[in-house]
Image (cartoon, grey):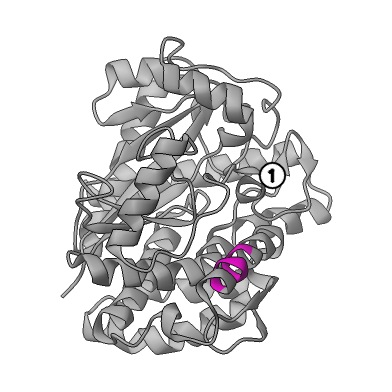
């Protein structure tokens, strides 16, 4: 048995050399299935909720190929990996819909700190209190998923010092989000934020993981992990998703797995989660993180390796261990940010690194699409 899963994929458009160029308004007007972001230089598509990983792969890859084909009709344009504007452009905002008042609010309040790209992973959980417990666990471990996915070490042609510059600069909103103790707690807190104006609408909850559903905050049916940077390699993304799903199966089958029953208070847990997110944004897999169950610190890669050993038998039982196993390659070879930084340290320029990454991603998606069609 597998849970339903879907992705919200944000991606930059631009040149094969890595310059970000905006086409969002045009794309949305011409291609069904794509939605605009406030800035014209990135665009989003959403995959349907699916259970089997064999179905998720084409749902991820084929829309991108369609988008690349459309961009080619506009000139020498393609899709860009990474979660920040590595080679420049963050000095200005390019509105995709100048008449949209919410977009105006975002530009005036946050500027280009929100003009990043990412993957949001949605996983279906029907029982609402089980969902809230799962969100508590994943919030305490969200830094692990950021560590695996980090892909934004560059911004405006400079090394920022962070593996995920995106999560370092992204305006987490509201500034303080508690650890939700129940569905009722989430409802009352959300209603209060809307009254106070700290949230402009029910979607204006920008944190590592949040409850999602058809009528938030009342009708909830899925967990949305929002912390991950853009993972260009679909095989790597499916491995991270399998890792998340198998961890959720541990939560579903063990009702005692809950941060609220541990050694830390809810306020302390929030502090731990935030410290871990900052550490993972800085150093990703080599970050020293506070373990929410045991206390004390351990490296993100060691924590992930420990959990991998626990979830691997579950993946075998469900016949998805082949989708999980590429996670070991990330642990051995590093995430995208670490690989790019190694290339930079050997003397490659950022334009060279980004140009090669674009070409590699384009070829990988093309080869997968040919296999899938």
Which residue is at the front of the view, 197 or 102? 197
**Residue 296 quadrant:** bottom right
Which residue is at the front of the view, 320 or 16? 320
Per the image, label 1 sits on a secondary structure element best described as helix
Seen in the picture, residue 23 relative to 230 is either above or below; the reply is above
**Residue 308 quadrant:** bottom left
Which residue is at the front of the view, 259 or 24? 259
Q: Main secondary structure of the magenta part?
A: helix
Where in the figure is residue 38, as x and y percent of width and height? 47, 24
Write the residue at 32% across / 82% down. 250
Please check the rendered image and state whether residue 263 is part of the magenta-colored stretch, yes or no. Answer: no
Seen in the picture, residue 24 relative to 6 is either above or below; the reply is above
Quarter of the image containing the N terminus?
bottom left
Write the residue at 33% across / 46% down. 61
Q: Left or right of 327: which side holds 130?
A: left
Write the residue at 33% across / 21% down. 28
* Number of dots carrying numbers: 1
The answer to whether residue 87 is seen in the rendering is yes
Q: Left or right of 255: which side holds 84?
A: right
The answer to whether residue 73 is seen in the rendering is no
Seen in the picture, residue 133 relative to 74 is either above or below; the reply is below
Q: Left or right of 34: which side holds 20?
A: right
Q: Which residues are magenta?
A: 269-274
* Mark 1 surroundings: few (<14), some (14-19) or many (≥20) residues within 10 A: some
Write the residue at 53% across / 47% down. 360
Where in the figure is residue 245, as x and y percent of width and height? 32, 71
Seen in the picture, residue 196 relative to 109 is either above or below; the reply is below
Give the labeled residue for mark 1: 353
Q: Left or right of 173: which side holds 57?
A: left
């Amino acid at each position: 048995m597998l849970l339903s899963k879907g992705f919200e994929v944000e991606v930059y458009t631009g040149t094969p050399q890595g310059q970000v160029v905006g086409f969002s308004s045009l794309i949305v007007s011409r291609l069904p299935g794509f939605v605009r972001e406030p800035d014209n230089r990135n665009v989003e598509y959403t995959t349907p909720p699916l259970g089997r990983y064999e179905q998720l792969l084409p749902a991820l890859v084929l829309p991108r190929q369609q988008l690349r084909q459309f961009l080619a009709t506009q000139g020498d344009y393609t899709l860009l990996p990474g979660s920040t504007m590595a080679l420049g452009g963050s000095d200005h905002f390019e509105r995709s819909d100048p008449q949209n008042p919410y977009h105006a609010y975002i530009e005036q309040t946050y500027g280009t700190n929100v003009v990043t790209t990412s993957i949001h992973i949605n996983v279906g959980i029907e029982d609402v209190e089980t969902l809230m417990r799962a969100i508590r666990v994943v919030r305490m471990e969200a830094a692990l998923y950021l560590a695996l996915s980090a892909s934004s070490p560059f911004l405006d042609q400079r090394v920022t010092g962070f593996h995920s510059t995106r999560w370092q600069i992204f305006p987490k909103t509201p500034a303080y989000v508690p650890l939700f103790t129940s569905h009722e707690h989430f409802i009352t807190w959300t209603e209060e934020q809307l009254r106070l104006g700290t949230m402009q609408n029910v979607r204006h909850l920008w944190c590592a993981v949040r409850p999602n559903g058809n009528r938030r905050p009342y009708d909830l049916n899925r967990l949305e992990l929002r912390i991950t940077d853009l993972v260009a390699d679909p095989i790597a993304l499916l491995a991270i998703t399998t890792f998340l799903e198998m961890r959720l199966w541990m939560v579903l089958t063990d009702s005692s797995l809950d941060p609220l029953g541990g050694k830390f208070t809810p306020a302390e847990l929030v502090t731990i989660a935030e410290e871990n997110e900052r550490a993972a944004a800085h150093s990703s897999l080599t970050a020293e993180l506070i373990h929410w169950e045991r206390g004390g610190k351990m490296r993100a890669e060691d924590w992930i390796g420990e959990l991998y050993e626990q979830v691997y038998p579950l993946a075998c039982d469900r016949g998805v261990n082949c989708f999980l196993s590429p996670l070991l390659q990330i642990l051995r070879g590093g995430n995208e940010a670490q690989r790019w930084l190694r290339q930079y340290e050997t003397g490659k320029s950022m334009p060279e690194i980004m140009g090669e990454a674009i070409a590699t991603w384009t070829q990988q998606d093309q080869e997968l699409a040919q296999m899938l069609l």
